Amino acid sequence: MKNKYALITGASSGIGLEIAKSLAKRNYNLVLTSRREPLLRKVADELISSFGIEVDYISCDLTDIKAPQLLYDFCKQNAYQIDLLVNNAGYAIPSPFDQTPMEEEEKFIRVLGISVIALCKLFVVEMLKNRQGRIMIISSVAAFAPPSSIQTLYGPIKTFMNRFSEGLNRNYNHKGITSTAVCPGYTITNFHTASGVQKEMDNVPKFMKKEAAQVAEEAVQATLKGKQVCVPTKTFKVIVFLLKIIPHSFFSLVSAVLAPGRFEKK
Ligand SMILES: NC(=O)c1ccc[n+]([C@@H]2O[C@H](COP(=O)([O-])OP(=O)(O)OC[C@H]3O[C@@H](n4cnc5c(N)ncnc54)[C@H](OP(=O)(O)O)[C@@H]3O)[C@@H](O)[C@H]2O)c1
């Protein structure tokens, strides 16, 4: 059996890429995955030459029902013992709910929800055998916020992921396995462009726009400590605290003034 590995979904850019660097710094060997193979190859080469760790990659599309099993089999065949599973891949649907075909909603729920559950289901069995394992689920501040008017299912699926992570902790903490729901706020990545909401997000004040490297570093620290929930950066810790105590109608009103386009009724 080779050294311990971390498997990172959505490792080709943004938060996932920074998590890969943060783990490489800590001497983790890595298995990277996303759809864009040339990017994965480039990232793998850079990490190998900068950190001297072992890095492998496999391109796959998490909208494919077979993808989680494919990733699991790839790790098994290569004897990569996954000690840390990072569920990070994600996007948001740019079109309004009533104009989005059901197949698109299903793909979205598969990438952000079902594939996460399937990967946890596969890898938790190995972790149980080893009586140790860390799981990171990249959720969002949206899990705590009122549903946005531009991405109807995004907040709800992230809330579901937080609850799922809680369930994993309830079931497996006493067996040496922890799950950390990481809930970033606005992070500067390709996410908003890829999700077609860059225009609305340009309204977000500068103090609320965080670097992916900082978010990733806090996420990794919290996961390795076995924390249940991590809200990276002080700004968003305060915002999540406020979201828990103030009425959501008031929060929507303040957001509409601070960063219009996301919480108004359309
Ligand atoms: N940026 C923010 O403000 C923010 C805030 C809160 C939470 N988040 C969450 O953070 C996570 C990472 O997003 P990011 O901000 O880093 O955005 P990003 O830069 O767009 O990265 C998204 C990653 O997901 C991968 N991905 C997307 N669709 C996929 C699919 N069908 N199959 C496999 N991989 C797929 C992409 O790779 P390929 O295109 O190569 O497949 C890419 O590596 C997401 O779960 C997002 O919901 C982001």
Image (tube, grey):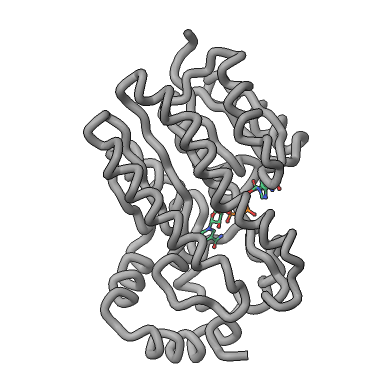
Task: Give the side of residue 199 with respect to residue 164, left or right.
Answer: right
Outermost residue, front direction?
Answer: 102
Outermost residue, top direction?
Answer: 1
**Residue closer to the observer: 176 or 219:** 176
**Residue closer to the observer: 234 or 139:** 139
Please state the horizontal and vertical placement of residue 22, each as a whole percent of the image: 46, 37
Q: Where 42 sits versus 186, above or below?
A: above
Residue 1 in sight: yes
Please state the horizontal and vertical placement of residue 250, each as a whole percent of the image: 38, 90
Name which residue lies at 53% across and 31% down.
7
Numbered-mark total? 0
**Residue closer to the observer: 219 or 245:** 245
Residue 184 in sight: no
Which of the 4 quarters of the picture holds residue 265?
bottom right
Task: Give the side of residue 56 with respect to residue 142, left or right.
Answer: right
Please state the horizontal and vertical placement of residue 142, each as a whole percent of the image: 47, 68
Please state the horizontal and vertical placement of residue 21, each as a whole percent of the image: 52, 36
Which of the 4 quarters of the picture holds residue 199?
bottom right
Name which residue lies at 34% across and 69% down.
240
Name which residue lies at 38% across and 67% down.
236
Outermost residue, left direction?
Answer: 174
The C terminus lies in quadrant? bottom right
Name which residue lies at 32% across and 25% down.
132
